[in-house]
Image: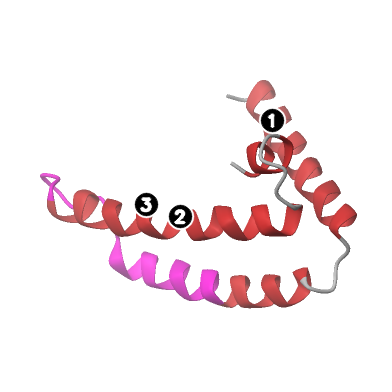
Amino acid sequence: MIPLQVLWAGVGQKNANANSLVAIIPIAIVALPIYYFLQRTPQVDLHFALFLTIGSVVGVYLGARLLGRVPEREVALAVAVVMLVVGAKEVISP
């Protein structure tokens, strides 16, 4: 989602990162009842999900504060490096 916003829509790197995070919210809200209530056995471990949520909230706060201090070019480079590493991992070990 981030590369499409940056390359095709002309959105700045920092805004694209923020937009993609905001887009996850409605997806998660819709997915939770489906995975928890509409499966034969719930696919959500609420205890584990609580710890993930706490870590995510702390990480988002710290990341957003840091993002304001990092220049746009370095953010774009960091996103590109992460995407290359993940892509290489998928090619090597799908």
Q: Is residue 53 left or right of residue 64?
A: left
Q: Residue at horizontal 29%, vertical 66%?
A: 46
Q: Is residue 22 above or below residue 54?
A: above
Whether residue 37 appears in this view of the structure is yes
Question: Which quadrant of the figure contains the N terminus?
Answer: top right
Q: Is residue 42 above or below residue 10?
A: below
Q: Residue at horizontal 58%, vertical 56%?
A: 19
Whether residue 44 appears in this view of the structure is no
Query: What secondary structure is marked by label 3?
Result: helix
Image coordinates of residue 25 in percent, x first then y, are 41, 60
Image coordinates of residue 13 in percent, x first then y, are 75, 52
Query: What secondary structure is marked by label 1?
Result: helix
Amino acid type of the residue that numbered disc 3 sits on in the rendered structure: Ile
**Which residue position is annotated with label 3?**
27
Crowding at dot 2, Cα within 10 Å, few <14 / some 14-19 / many 20+, comes out as few
Mark 3 or 1: in front is 3
**Which residue position is annotated with label 2?**
24
User: How far apart, in angstroms, are the residues tagged by discs 2 and 1?
Assistant: 21 Å
The magenta region covers 38-57
Image coordinates of residue 29 in percent, x first then y, are 31, 59
The first of marks 2 and 1 along the sequence is 2
Which of the 4 image quarters holds residue 4? Answer: top right
Which numbered circle lies on residue 87? 1
